[in-house]
Image (tube, rainbow, N blue to C red):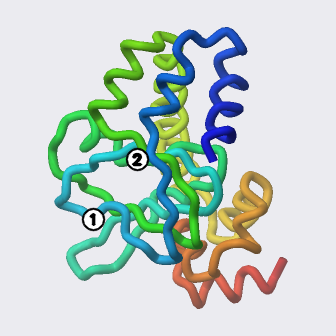
Amino acid sequence: MIDVLKHHLIKRLGKDIENLELVLEKFKPIVTKRNEQLLKQGEVCKYVYFIVQGCLQVFVYDNEMNETTRDIVIEDNWCSELISFGSGNPATENIRTIEPSQLLAIDRKGFQEMMQTVPQFDKVYKQLLEASYANSVYRINTFVSLSGLDRIKWLMYKRPSLMTRVSSKLIAFYLGINKDVFSRLKAKL
């Protein structure tokens, strides 16, 4: 598993990464089952996860316990509730596995040591923050102006693998569409 992360970091930072082996030692492997809860709202987020294999859902519950999915994260990506992880405050989001997953987790202390030990990792952290922010803002701004059918088309164009990999119900949550409406609209394509 660790070789996948090593390749990921080299691809982003180049081959000359000082102390790379020390960084890799900070990650602990986690193998999960489907629907395993990694973080619950109200808990402090203790880890940043690198997804070697699998798929994670980042979501919140409203007052009536309805789910709103902020993101679905797949292999070769990072996942965390960054505000809670960075501040130590309770998380406002939940993270759970959608399918059996292989993850590499680093805790806050290890993450901070890594930032000090490998200054280049700051670049990866900034990419992680920027990607998370850009994805959230883009989805909010775009989904406000798109019809349900156009949201489905957007997903088919931008993230086609999710259409066959994730349940229709979860995709509907992600797109902000009622699951029955989603099924009717999808049939029109």
Indicate left or right for 167 with 80 as reference.
right
Vertical relation: 93 (above or below) 85: below
The front one of 37 and 107 is 107
Q: Are marks 2 and 1 in contact (CB under 8 Å)?
A: no
Of the two numbered discs 2 and 1 on the same chain, state the one appearing first in sequence: 1
Query: Residue drawn at (71%, 81%), measured in percent from left and top?
Result: 185
Element at badge 2?
Answer: loop
The front one of 43 and 83 is 43
Q: Amino acid at mark 2?
A: Ser
Query: Residue drawn at (67%, 9%), measured in percent from left and top?
Result: 16
Vertical relation: 54 (above or below) 16: below
Say few, some or many: other residues with alpha carbon within 10 Å of mark 2 (under 14 / 14 to 19 / 20 or more). Answer: many
Q: Amino acid at mark 1?
A: Lys
**What residue is pinned by disc 2?**
80
Q: CA distance from mark 2 to mark 1?
A: 12 Å
Residue 176 position within the rendered picture, expressed as x and y whole percent measured from the top left = 51, 69
**What residue is pinned by disc 1?**
40
